[in-house]
Image: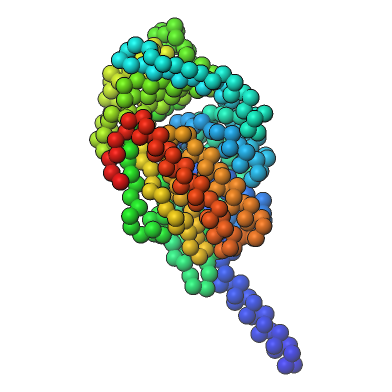
Amino acid sequence: MKLSLLLLLLLLLIMYSTALSPSIDCGIIGCGPSGLALAHSLLAEGHTVRVFERRDEFRPVGAAVFLHPFALNSLRKVSPKLESQLLEASTRIHTLSFRTLSSGSEGFSFSLENLQDSERVFGAPFVAVRFWDMLKALKIGLPEDIFRFGYQLERYEQHDEGGVTLHFQGKESVDVKYLIDAGGIRSRTREQLLKKNDERIPRLRATFSVVDRDSLSTALSRESSDSRAAETGELAFLAGDNLSVVAMGLDDGGAFWSQTDLGADPFDPIAATDEDLKKKLADDFADFPSGVKALVSATNFEDAIETSVCELPVTWKWGEDDVTLLGDAAHAQLPALGLGVSTAFGDVEEITEQIRRRGLNREALRKYESKRKISCAVLQLMSRGMFYLNGVSANQN
Ligand SMILES: Cc1cc2nc3c(=O)[nH]c(=O)nc-3n(C[C@H](O)[C@H](O)[C@H](O)COP(=O)(O)OP(=O)(O)OC[C@H]3O[C@@H](n4cnc5c(N)ncnc54)[C@H](O)[C@@H]3O)c2cc1C
């Protein structure tokens, strides 16, 4: 009799502690490249996850990015299938070209035409991909029921006994065992962890867009005999006075371009209307080759984004207790070296490795942080240095 009472008490105790412990192992903030890649990794290790995204739905976002071989190498270690999904959506880069245009006259130029060897040398190709295509490729294979759209994290609450409560704007709170915030440059967790001295630093003004195949070929035939600015697989850099353009043709016949304006004050208001932006770019590109003008005239200005590009100060604090940061939330850098996504996937590779070895626990989170902090700080500073070399004056810091 006494024994059965004891067993009953034990059972109740177990049920009580299970009820207290959150059933979700990990809350991931952000449906960007790092959050999506991490979700694959945690699910493969048998953990329950929820991905909370402030946007109302999974919808087109951003322009295009180019990725170093490190990005694909890291992704392969997380999941070879994920790597091939991303490769499928990408265009391989075979040539990198650079031209300076000083006040209309052509200056110095060079090109590297053997980038297709990068698979043999670095283990993966250099590629470019529409940001939205990248997100779609990374989402393939993730169950729909792990996503919560329209959930904007406001703050988290760490409990002494372990576990974290996530508080969202206008939504119910959610308990999770661990919080990994991949919310990018506006990460609320980062703000809460660092409390102060962590302002985003605007450094320059950028405008970017992707252009579809039909508009591009019409514009090229109308305006240009020089299609070099948008040749498929050629990542072309053109540097003018204070203005530079990066452009590349994609496998599907479309192209992407981005313009960085090193002369503009990043604190200036952005163009009020699409027409204003179109006019500003027409003036900016007056001395640029006709291929670049064709790219701009083929652009649907509703899809063009003009923005101040910011970076985050280097921090040595990436997490505490059951919370950590991942990707841009930990180390947003200027896009001078095109290393943002590669660095984010490097984080996912490292955290995956630590969780595989140690399980999802505090030790794994701290080990991941200590392994990544120094190299990410170096990359942040190198990206900043690259912009200063290009003539950006320090606005602050
Ligand atoms: C102009 C420009 C050009 C770039 N070019 C390149 C390039 O060529 N190559 C390259 O590798 N990188 C480039 N980058 C950098 C690259 O875009 C980032 O490094 C990368 O997107 C980081 O991924 P992430 O998942 O960490 O963050 P993000 O992509 O920023 O994703 C964060 C996600 O979290 C969501 N979120 C944010 N806050 C909350 C919240 N409170 N609650 C819920 N959800 C939230 C956001 O909506 C978003 O979906 C460029 C960046 C810029 C600005």
The image shows residue 297 at horizontal and vertical percentages of 37, 17
Q: x and y percent of residue 69 in the render? A: 59, 34
Residue lying at 57% horizontally and 38% vertically, measured from the top left = 71
Vertically, is 364 above or below 243?
A: below
Question: Is 134 in front, or is 71?
Answer: 71
Left/right placement of residue 51 relative to residue 305 reads right
Residue 158 position (above or below residue 96):
below
Looking at the rendered image, the quarter that the N terminus falls into is: bottom right
Q: Is residue 245 at least partly visible in the picture?
A: yes
Residue at 33%, 50% in the rendered image: 199
Does residue 26 appear in this view? no
* Place of residue 84 in the rendered image (x, y in percent of width and height, measured from the top left): 65, 35
Instruction: Count how many numbered circles sit on residues in the image.
Output: 0
Q: Looking at the image, what colour scheme do you see?
A: rainbow
Of residues 155 and 262, the one nearer the viewer is: 262
Relative to residue 308, is residue 378 drawn left or right?
right
Residue at the extreme bottom of the image, as rendered: 2
Q: At 65% across and 33% down in the image, what residue appears?
A: 123
Quadrant containing ligand 1 reads top left
Query: Which of the two residues, 206 or 101, is positioned nearer the viewer here?
Result: 101
The image shows residue 129 at horizontal and vertical percentages of 53, 30
Image-quadrant location for residue 275 = top left
Q: Is residue 222 above or below residue 358?
A: above
Look at 61% across and 37% down and name the residue there: 72
